[in-house]
Every structure is written in C-alpha cells, then in structure tokens.
Amino acid sequence: MAKQIDILKILKNNLQITEIQPLKENLSQIEAYVYALPPEENEILYLIDNEEVVSIKRDFLINEIKQILASHTLERARYYLQRLLKALSEEKTTAFNDLNLNRWKEYDDILTDSLWLFDKRDTSGVHSADYWGNFIPQIPHQLIRRYTKPGEWVLDTFAGSGTTLLECKRLGRNSLGIELQAEVAQTIEKLIQSQVSDNQAVKSHIIQADALELNYQETCNTLKIKQIALAIVHPPYWDIIKFSDQPADLSNAVSLTDFLAKMGKLADKIAEILPKNRYMALVISDKYEKGEWIPLGFYTMQTILTKKFKLKSIVVKNFEDTKGKMNQKELWRYRALAGGFYVFKHEYIFLFQKK
C-alpha cells in the first residue's frame, strides 16, 4: 500500500537555506521518516504539497537524499536538490517511449546492456510455456517498454503462443499479431481475452494469415491502425523445429537461401508500414548441422541490412532452463565434449531502426 507523506514542500523550502548543515539536518529528518515507513516491495510514495501530488519510488527518493547528504559543499547539495525537484516536476521523454529521463534512475528494471541473462521465464499473467519454440515474456516486455508509448501499436509477424500480444495488453499497448496456423491463432484469441489489463481501451488483433503474403497496409487500414510503432519478429529458426506441414511455414524453407530470401521479403513488407526512425527487433538464433555451426542469426541480420534498416544494437540473451534441453544438460555436455563443439546457450536480439 502506498503511503502519503507531506515532504515535497519541505524539499522546496530547503532551496532557500543558505548553510549546508541546516539543509542536511532537514533532509536527514526526511530520510529517517521514509525509512520508518513499513517496507514494501516497489513501494510508491506520494509526495504532497497543497494540492500537488507526485508519485516516486521509495528507493529512488532515499538514494537521491543520500547523495545530497554526502555533498561537501552547499553549492553541490543545492545542485542535487534542484535535480531532485526537477525530476519531480518536469518530464523529459524521447519520441519512441514514455520514460521520464529526468527520473532515469527509477527504471532499474529496464535493461540497457547487450547481455541479457535470465534464470527462468516470467510465468505471471496467462503466459504459457506449452508452445514449442516460444520465447520468454521478458524479451517483448523489455522491447515494448523501451520502444513504444502506451496506446501505440506493436506488430508481431509470428505470433506463436501470443507472448508479445499478451505483454502488450499488460503494458497498455495495442497489438497486431500474424499467425499462419488457424488453430494456434484461435488459442491466442482465448488467451488474450483472459489476460487482465489496467487499460480497458487496449486493442488486440490476431490475424490468421501468411506473414509473407499479407497486405499490411490494407490490414492496418481495415483495422483503423494509423501507425505501427514497433515490429517484433521471432521467426522459426529455419528447420530446427518443424511447426507445421504448410509450405508457407518458414520452418519448411527448402534451403538457407530460400529462408533468407523470405526474411528479406518480410523486412520489405515491414518497412512499408513502419515509420522512419521506429524500431524492428529480430529474435533469432544459429543452428548446428552435420558438425558445422551455421550462423543463421548473422546471415539474417545481413539480409535485413540490405533493406531499409540500419543496425542499432545486438543483444545476446541466455535463458538457463530451456524447454529444448530440459533434463538433458548432462547429455548435451557429454555430446559437446565428444563432438568438439559448444552447447547453444543463447539467442540474438538484433535491433534495427527504419532509415
């Protein structure tokens, strides 16, 4: 439960103090008061000054106060205090998300490094790990928060178990998912309906179609989607897992050249509806075949770079408890030692920006 504390006015009044010791004494009292509140995970405090109410994470406020208390001069202390008050009163955002950069320290759950290590998948909400080859919810969660704003549209060209669409609904983003298999699309529909959202206006559409043949602009017009803000592409990793017997299924591509040509075609289609400077994320891995490592991820990356995209980042993601190697760690370790190779422990997230 959030607590109401009347300290915003005290923080503002401290700017008028002309000596560092009284300023620190006031802030020490605030720090002690906040520490005395019952500890609750991710607790949000509401700072009140007359009719003005500002929410702030408890830990963020404490850390900012600690930095002010550690200052050796009045000038430095007032600088940090002014920065804190600015964080509480002004917003600074980018064109592609709603993160307040004046309070960037509060977003300690958002990853900014290129190595993502996860012990296990997020099982909150109605996410399911039953669909073979799906990806963990943490991936779309991070991408959606970094590259969209609430109410914007996210495109998932290979909807699979609906992971991206479910995260969109949870985060207040609209979503359009494309799924080749009719029965899988129907399952996604049911999951989306059962997923709770704080925003009742959120829209989720699942289209049963071939992602490589669908007319995206026509589909957006029909659904009254003005603009796609982010595209998340998590295709089959060529023929590692056979998802269906349909020729249009990328897992049935007849060759590596065929697979890459189809991915290039998809990139062209996405480029047609994705505005300039918005992002597309490709989640993919490599494969091992006949004793040879096939750099499928980098081949696909290079194909997309021949289109209307530039590369912004490469993220390497490791997920410890993979379904494909569940209860077989010792077997795979033996195979690696015997065969002179290394066991796959990672996937790539290639982040592209529309030119």
Image (cartoon, rainbow, N blue to C red):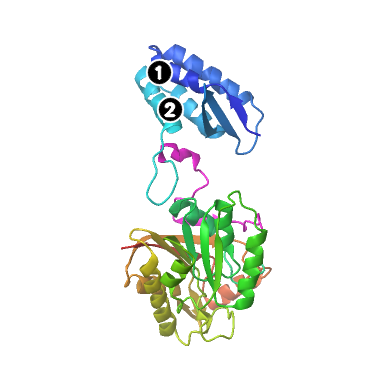
Which residue is at 48% across, 84% downward? 253
Residue 114 x %, y %: 44, 56
Rendered image: mark on residue 85: 2
Question: Which mark is drawn over residue 220?
Answer: none
Q: Are marks 2 and 1 in contact (CB under 8 Å)?
A: yes
Which quarter of the picture shows residue 324?
A: bottom right
- Whole-percent x and y of residue 204? 56, 62
Residue type marked 2: Leu
Residue 55 sits above or below residue 349 on the image: above
Query: Can you see residue 127?
Result: no
- The residue labelled by disc 1 is 15
> What amino acid type should be assigned to the residue bearing mark 1?
Leu
Give the alpha-carbon distance from disc 2 to disc 1, as whole Å.
10 Å
Q: Residues within 10 Å of mark 2 (few under 14, many from 20)?
A: some
Quadrant position of residue 166? bottom right
Residue 277 percent location from the top left of the image: 34, 58
Q: Percent from the top left, x then y, of residue 16?
A: 39, 14
Q: Earlier in the sequence, mark 2 or mark 1?
A: 1
In this picture, is 110 found above or below 66? below
User: Under tag 1, what secondary structure?
Assistant: helix
Magenta-highlighted residues? 101-128
Q: Main secondary structure of the magenta part?
A: loop
Closer to the camera, 9 or 57?
9
